[in-house]
Image (cartoon, rainbow, N blue to C red):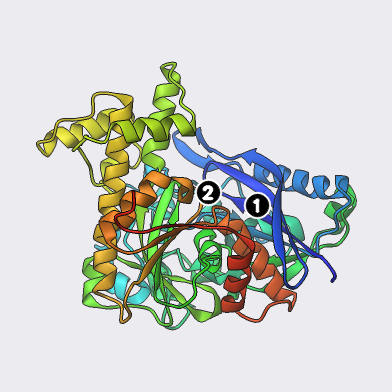
Amino acid sequence: MENYYFLAFDLGATSGRSILGVFDGVNFEMKELTRFSNSIMELHGKYYWDVFGLYKSLKEGLVECVRQNIKPTSIGIDTWGVDFGYVGKDGTILGLPRAYRDPYTDGAPEDYFKLMPRDKVYGLTGIQIMNFNSLYQLYRAKQEDFSPLAQADKILFMPDLLSYMLTGKQVCEYTEASTSQILNPATRRFESSLLEAIGVSPSLLHPLTDPGVVIGTLTDALAEETGIGKVPVVAVAGHDTASAVLAVPAENPNFAYLSSGTWSLMGVETETPVLTEESYEKNFTNEGGIEGTTRFLKNITGMWLLEQCRKEWEREGRKYSYAEIMDMAVKAEGVKAYVNPDDPRLANPASMSRMIARICEENGMTPPATDAEYIRCIFESLVRRYVEVIDMLSGMVSFPIEKLHIIGGGSQNDLINRMTADALGIPVVAGPSEATAIGNCMMQAKAAGLVKDRWEIRKIIARAFSVKTFLPGEK
């Protein structure tokens, strides 16, 4: 059987990888080619992504393919949501994209709701109200008289901006655009009134492109510089969670998923948006999935809490391996302190550990006293939040949630997986850990006509990757 080679660029908020998926129509396997860092840059009080550095890293991934004598069938890019770059009328990229952790959007939703009521914004978009959504970034940029916005002809969301750099072609991929709080999930059209309310032209946005469409080929200059040739670039499910959900090895629709990493995104896959008074009150989000599905979910602050604590500890000379962290968490089992991971004060505090301690004290709990106790506190906090969200989901969807699939890097945390199964009382299936890159590659395979739909993709993934199942009450 002929092998097809799919190159996935999978970019997260702290790092990125180029990963090669090899598929012969039946069997599927993956290998990492390159890994590179990605971090937020602070400059003159504003926070940016170094998109030109990312472009350089993508080129290095192309060169590595040539070095290994691999000619990709196609290329796909997935990233985090909401952020975007500005492009001028002549095609010039106007500076660096602002990062979603830039505090310039603090309080922005409340200010925006003076122009248009909160319930109307949610009714039009079905998106969880979060201060960094694209709508509020544009609102603040307009208030700042931010020069790139003033000069922009178009905005391109992060995966679309990077694919533009590779191909010279501009698109607006549906799943990524759906995170913006500008898109109506029922009509699948942008709501012009949301931008007009802040004096921003709706013409900034391109018409939507569905996942699986070929954007174009690598530019002549890039094809020659890297030596890889004119490889097609596919608009995959550009939002990393949409790619990850595609890779859930589920057997039927009665499942919930938890895409676990810096963020924990917990939800279900539905055929239509859930736009109810309850979904509004509980601040759930309706984001685009593949094949017209909706990812009905809630964004939960995930391992960000632990990542920030680890950075503090490393600065103080204490560096722990993943295995050590797991051992410390197990030994600190008696810790009773916990916080709400979604407390706004935990978004980007000067000291994560001090803020956790402060919140515990405010709620009458003894704060953690050691690094191990902080780790256990964070794990307990996440599991409690997962239970709350599953309970809310169960009351808003029409099918029983029979199983929770945990995907992404956090799926390798056996302790949290076991704690979650016990707390929920349903099986927890952990893996694959590389779900985002797998979904990226398999969407390219669908674009190549090698698979027909998401259920065939999920069967292939279930055969190709081993998972762990945690049953409630197991020791």
Residue projecting furthest to the top: 317
Which structural element holds mark 1?
loop
Q: Nearer the viewer, residue 367 or 294?
A: 367
Q: Residue at x 49, y 75 (%)?
A: 251
Q: Can residue 296 be seen by looking at this rendering?
A: no
**Is 395 displayed left or right of 85 in the figure?**
left
Residue 275 vs 423, above or below: the answer is below
Q: Quadrant of residue 375?
A: top left
Q: Amino acid at mark 2?
A: Ser
Q: State the image coordinates of residue 203 (x, y, percent, origin top left).
A: 54, 71
Q: Mark 2 sits on what residue?
A: 147
Q: Earlier in the sequence, mark 2 or mark 1?
A: 1
- Which of label 2 and label 1 is nearer to you? 1
Q: Mark 1 sits on what residue?
A: 93
Q: Mark 2, residues whose alpha carbon is within 10 Å: few (<14), some, or many (≥20)?
A: few
Q: Are marks 2 and 1 in contact (CB under 8 Å)?
A: no
Which structural element holds mark 2?
helix
Query: How far apart are the two marked residues, 2 and 1, measured between alpha carbons?
Result: 12 Å
**Is 267 displayed left or right of 63 in the figure?**
left
Q: Nearer the viewer, residue 182 or 319?
A: 319
Q: Can residue 432 be seen by looking at this rendering?
A: yes
Residue 87 vs 56, above or below: the answer is below
Q: Residue at x 21, y 34 (%)?
A: 334
Residue projecting furthest to the left: 364
Q: State the image coordinates of residue 366 (x, y, percent, origin top left).
A: 14, 30
Residue 124 vs 179, above or below: the answer is below
Q: Residue at x 30, y 60 (%)?
A: 112
Q: Amino acid at mark 1?
A: Ile
Residue 62 circle label: none
**Is 307 displayed left or right of 401 in the figure?**
right
Q: State the image coordinates of residue 100 (x, y, percent, origin top left).
A: 44, 48
Q: Quadrant of the N terminus?
A: bottom right
